[in-house]
Image (spheres, helix red, strand yellow):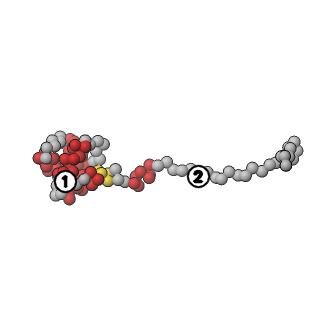
Amino acid sequence: MRWNLRMKAAEAGIWKSTEMRRRLADAGLEISAGKMSGLWIGNPTTIRLDDLDVICAVLGCTPSDLLLCEPDVVAARRPRQVQTAAPSPVVPRLGRHRSVPPA
């Protein structure tokens, strides 16, 4: 997943994290400067669903606008399949000290 907060904020005319923080506070969500920095700069490891609701309301978007799927990253994490050679056919060896299979 990729966190798309800054792009959605830019589309809403919000260019600085302090402006986003002020708008969230006006909507009833008080976020510390450190937490806002984490949301603004990088990919948050956790986010409360209540907070996500307020962020979406302020930006006029949905959670799917903020959380973007990255199927290529998922595919890269899968273990590679090892190709095995087809088993060779069993050929009976006849000769000295060997018996012939029953007919």
Q: Is residue 91 left or right of residue 84?
A: right
Q: Position of residue 85 (x, y in %)?
A: 64, 52
Disc number at residue 83?
Answer: 2
Q: Position of residue 101 (x, y in %)?
A: 83, 46
Dot 1: what SS? helix
Dot 2: what SS? loop
Q: Position of residue 96 (x, y in %)?
A: 88, 44
One can see residue 70 in this view: yes
Front-lying residue, 15 or 103: 103
Residue at far front of view:
103
Amino acid at circle 1: Leu
Residue at 16% over, 58% down: 13
For mark 1, what is the residue?
59
Query: Depth-wise, is mark 1 or mark 2 nearer the camera?
Result: 1
Front-lying residue, 24 or 33: 24
Residue at 13% over, 49% down: 23
Q: Position of residue 28 (x, y in %)?
A: 13, 44
Q: Is residue 68 left or right of residue 56?
A: right
User: Measured along the vertical axis of the image, is residue 13 above or below residue 33?
Assistant: below
Residue at far left of view:
26
One can see residue 15 in this view: no
Amino acid at circle 2: Gln
Label 2 neighbour load within 10 Å: few <14, some 14-19, many 20+: few
Q: Are marks 1 and 2 in contact (CB under 8 Å)?
A: no
Residue at 11% over, 47% down: 26
Label 1 neighbour load within 10 Å: few <14, some 14-19, many 20+: many
In the rendered picture of this protein, how many numbered marks are placed on residues?
Answer: 2
Residue at 20% over, 49% down: 55
Q: Quick one: label 1 or label 2, which is nearer the N terminus?
A: 1
Disc number at residue 44?
Answer: none
Kindly report the distance in space between the C-alpha atoms of the residues bearing marks 1 and 2.
49 Å
